[in-house]
Image (cartoon, helix red, strand yellow):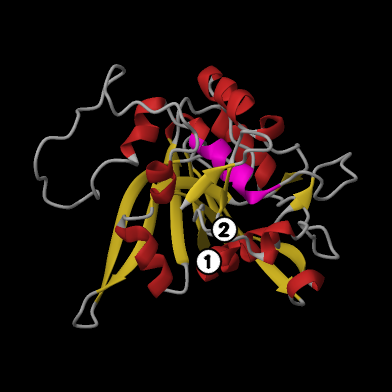
């Protein structure tokens, strides 16, 4: 499906290119403002060594019944910013054109990564992308609940795939230029953004995306994980692994914080996002309400 870019000897391109791939990243006429809850959440996350969040989706059975499905996922920061370990940084510099994207954009999209063969993605597609995420930050006695829509990117076919095209469009609307950035799109691509998230994983975790479909009955022998396992993968463009790797961005529409740090004065807030307009003319406004705890 993929061949490496022989001009740069880095990256991969579909054999059949779509016109979408050469399109520039465009911004809405109103650059989305930074969410008012971000500063507090960022501060509290920094007080928490290693953090995960619970992701809830809805599954519909063949009989038409609905069931909640929850799992714990590693929180990978806000798209497209993701921290790299030293090996990941080296791999990006050695394998990706210009070491990756320029630091042009930021957003309030919560991210996690997943295997495209897992059920959570089909559950999102069948429920109009609805999702809920929950943080419990024990060190600061704070609970954060996030409701919104989640979109998965990383399909190697790029914008030739309808689902990938839809997901990128939804995420693109949420991006804003970083302060001091004048050029909106020079050198920035979704392909590089996804590759950076792949590099964020350890070599063994990268190799796990080459494994048989998760959740299926185990058949035959497959290498156990470990630092010296044959699962370990340093190639950021391994075709099999990248076919299965996805980055999921949660577009928040409602955020709640329950503050239990002061037992004598419990506090609870809700922020609700209002949007106006469509496509490139969309505008955003967060409304804050204090609630009974």
Residue 118, how many percent across, how many down?
31, 55
Q: Quick one: label 2, few (<14), some, or many (20+) residues within 10 Å?
A: many
Determine whether 193 is above or below 64 in the image: above
Question: Does the rendering let one see residue 266?
Answer: no
- Residue plotted at (19% across, 29% down): 223
**Residue segment shown in magenta:** 189-198
Farthest residue to the front: give it.
Answer: 6
Q: Is residue 273 in view from this perspective?
A: yes
Residue on which the image places disc 1: 161
The residue sitting at 62% across, 43% down in the picture is 193
Q: Is 87 part of what is drawn in magenta? A: no
98 to the left or right of 16? right
Q: Quadrant of residue 284?
A: bottom right
Asked whether, in this view, residue 27 is left or right of residue 142, the answer is right
Crowding at mark 1 (Cα within 10 Å: few <14, some 14-19, many 20+): few
Q: Residue 77 sits in which quadrant?
A: top right
Q: Which residue is mark 2?
A: 158
Most distant residue in the left direction:
220
Toward the viewer: 181 or 102?
A: 102
Pick whichever, 18 or 77, lies toward us: 18
Look at the picture and state if 69 lies above or below 207: below
Assess whether mark 1 and mark 2 are in contact (beta carbons under 8 angstroms).
yes
């Amino acid at each position: 499906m993929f061949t490496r870019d022989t001009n740069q000897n880095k990256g991969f391109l579909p054999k059949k290119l779509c016109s979408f791939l050469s399109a520039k990243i465009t911004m809405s006429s109103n650059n989305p403002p930074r969410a008012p809850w971000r500063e507090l959440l960022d501060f509290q996350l920094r007080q928490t060594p290693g953090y995960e969040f619970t992701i809830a989706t809805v599954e519909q059975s063949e009989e038409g019944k609905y069931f909640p499905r929850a799992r714990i996922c590693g929180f990978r920061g806000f798209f497209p910013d993701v921290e790299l370990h030293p090996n990941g940084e080296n791999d990006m510099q050695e394998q990706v054109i210009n070491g990756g994207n320029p630091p042009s954009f930021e957003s309030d999209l919560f991210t996690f990564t997943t295997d495209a063969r897992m059920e959570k993605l089909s559950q999102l597609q069948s429920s109009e992308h609805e999702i809920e995420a929950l943080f419990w930050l024990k060190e600061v006695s704070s609970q954060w609940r996030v409701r919104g829509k989640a979109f998965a990117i990383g399909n190697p076919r790029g914008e030739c795939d309808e689902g990938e095209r839809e997901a990128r469009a939804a995420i693109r609307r949420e991006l804003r230029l970083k302060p001091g950035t004048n050029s909106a799109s020079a050198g920035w691509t979704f392909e590089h953004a996804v590759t950076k998230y792949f590099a964020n994983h350890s070599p063994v975790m990268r190799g796990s995306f080459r494994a048989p479909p998760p959740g299926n009955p185990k058949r035959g022998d497959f290498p156990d994980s470990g630092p010296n396992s044959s699962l370990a993968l340093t190639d950021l463009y391994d075709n099999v692994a990248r076919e299965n790797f996805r980055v999921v961005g949660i577009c928040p529409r409602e955020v709640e914080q329950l503050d239990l740090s002061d037992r004598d004065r419990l506090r609870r807030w809700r922020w609700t996002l209002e949007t106006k307009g469509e496509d490139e003319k969309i505008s955003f406004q967060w409304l804050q309400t204090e609630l009974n705890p």
